[in-house]
Image (cartoon, helix red, strand yellow):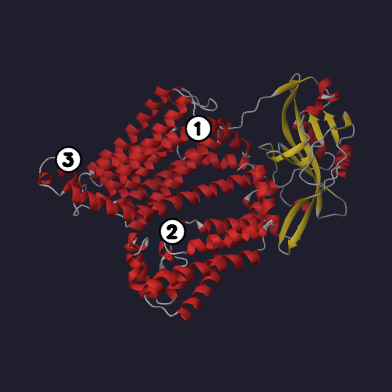
Amino acid sequence: MDIANFNALITWIARHPDWAYAVVFLAAFTESLAVVGLFIPGVLVMFGAGAVVAVGSLELWATLAWAAAGAIAGDAGSYWLGRHYRAELPHLWPFRRYPKLLAKGAAFFHRHGGMSIFLGRFVGPIRAVIPAVAGMLGMPPARFYAVNILSALGWAPTYILPGVVFGASLGLAGAVATRLALILVLLLILAWGGVWFVSRSVIWLQPRVEQGLGQLQSWAGSTPSARTGSFRGMVASLLDPARPESRALLVFAAVLIAAAWMFFGVIEDVLTGDPLVLVDKTAYHLLQGLRTPLGDSVMIALTELGDAAVTLPVVAAVLLWLVWKRAWRPAVYWLAAASFGAALTVILKAGFGLPRPLPMYDGSIAFGFPSSHAAMSIVIFGFLAVLAARELSLRGQLAVYSVVVLLAGLIAFSRIYLGAHWLSDVLGGLSFGVAWVALLGIAYLRRPAPAVAAHGLLAAASIALIAAAVVHAANQRDADAVRYAIQRPSTLMAQQDWWSQGWQTLPAWRIDIEGEYEQPLSVQWAGSLEFLRARLTARGWREALPVTGKSLLLWFDTRRPAMQLPLLPRVHDGANEALALIYPLKGKPDQRLVLRLWSSEKTLTPRTPIWVGTVTAERISRPLAWFNLPQDGQDFNVPRLALFESLSGLPTRLVGRDGVPQSVSEEIVWDKGVLLVHQPE
């Protein structure tokens, strides 16, 4: 969904709230239904509904009421099923496919009694069966409905209010850059979706693996050949019930087939120019349009986690730990996973020779497909999880694999965001990495191996990861900021052409999101920023406090005048302002003028850069008695006049634009005038 469609969706919700409330009700209802709730991401819908409440498109109390009503109805339906079928329930579809889940629900109910309805609403997978179990075990209806209603009234705000807080924070972030807010949403969806996928996959796979194991064991042991060296004999040996690895082997085999199918499918699409190539370009241009300086900093930090300077120390630390513990076989497999995985990735890159979106590297890693960051993050962290998982409980395995999916997913996303890879490069790298880990996992688990202390292994890897990441970031951050910077071509313009008509080719509005305009760029400066800073400083302008963790606390000091508060950065077309100055307004301590300038990507001959900017009157409002909130004034004519007076003595010209596109705000007061100023020769 692009930005315009997203805004259109919010507008549609504001005009048709009844449909939105219906979606909230249905999401809460289906998530509360027995078994069905395992596969419905209702929590994500509740969180999203809270975010929509924050922007004012839905009413908070109505949203809470519909969510609670859906939860009550869903649990009531599940309770009725259990009460109606009683002992027959475990034998009915789909309950018969989840006997262990029903057993866990029954044990939970026996342990907590009626309170299990309240507690179960907040507890993982068993939430989807507790009401049915309560009905099956004969809990009185009056008692059930009392606890059901109370728990739903607590559940709705628990899952919706965090979304409201998040949406409100995006409102403040939107004052800085809506693009950053969208990137945060994408990251949240990626993180939450990854963990949700892993947990639901485990729940979905568990009964099917059990069923598949039983069928394979029956087939492998049904003839005398099972006792010979035949293929059936090998399968019977691998699936021996005395070997706990048999389930993992079957899962790894399925994962290997799926990952290999995906990897070769991506290769086919890339080589034949199938629609995936078009998706590559769409994803690239979309994310390049959403880039912000703060977003770049976060993504560079994430992508550095996949650099060799970070992953190699992790490989070395784990290898040393395994050698110290004399776990020779795990050590050999660990070394093979990392070394052969890296070598195969380089060979594939050179073999396909497919270019990156932009040239960033030299030598063997100059090519893009497959992404080595995506592949090796899966290989290293994924096989680390394989080594540790044998000694962990199911819950521990779920947590470890969720962290791997989350970490690898964030690293992979950062590669697309920074323009280092196409989407197909990343998909190819991820699928290759998963296939390699699954193949090694099958080979590793075929034979019993000595126990590896999982907690010590994970601790060694975590310490190495954190230490290497901190050191690498300190040494590489500046170079990576240059490497991954947005590349925009700069064009030349003669000074006389700019002064007469060329200024109209520069943007008229500050671009905050794709296709929409926020504030008029009513100033154009040709010259050095240092010269302009010195000139305006002599006339009473000054630089505001920078935004730091400490200075942000000043926003809670409601007695502090506007001139003593930090200035939030603003983004124009993906870049922060290059210069920001503030000016006091006499008799108005809660207001200040703010001048911001951005690069126009145009240069006057021979080498004089042109900057575009806004000058606004910023007012500090206090909607709550303990918090300051900056708000831009809508009049852009008076502040421009104040700047003009401060620039007296410099070559200036006030010009008027023709055919200015419409802003997103109808309250803006602007006469379409632009102040041209240039540095004296």
Provide residue 489's location: percent of width, then percent of height.
66, 25
Q: What's the CA distance linking mark 2 and mark 1?
A: 31 Å
Q: Is residue 235 visible in this depiction of the protein?
A: yes
Mark 3–mark 1 CB contact (< 8 Å): no
Q: Does residue 224 sit above or below 261 in this rendering?
A: below
Provide residue 554's location: percent of width, then percent of height.
69, 56
User: How many other residues sit within 10 Å of disc 1, few (<14), some (14-19) or many (≥20)?
Assistant: some
Provide residue 591's location: percent of width, then percent of height.
81, 52
Q: What's the CA distance linking mark 2 and mark 3?
A: 37 Å
**Residue position for label 3:** 231
Q: Is residue 630 left or right of residue 151?
A: right
**Residue position for label 2:** 38
**Residue position for label 1:** 276
Residue type, mark 2 in image? Leu
Which residue is pictured at 42% across the width and 28% down the height? 268
Q: What's the CA distance linking mark 3 and mark 1?
A: 40 Å
Provide residue 194's location: percent of width, then percent of height.
46, 49
Which residue is pictured at 59% across the width and 44% down the height? 183
Mark 2–mark 3 CB contact (< 8 Å): no
Q: Tell me which numbered mark, 2 or 1, is placed earlier along the sequence.
A: 2
Q: Is residue 375 left or right of residue 15?
A: left
Q: Which mark is residue 115?
A: none
Look at the image and tell me in which quarter the C terminus lies: top right
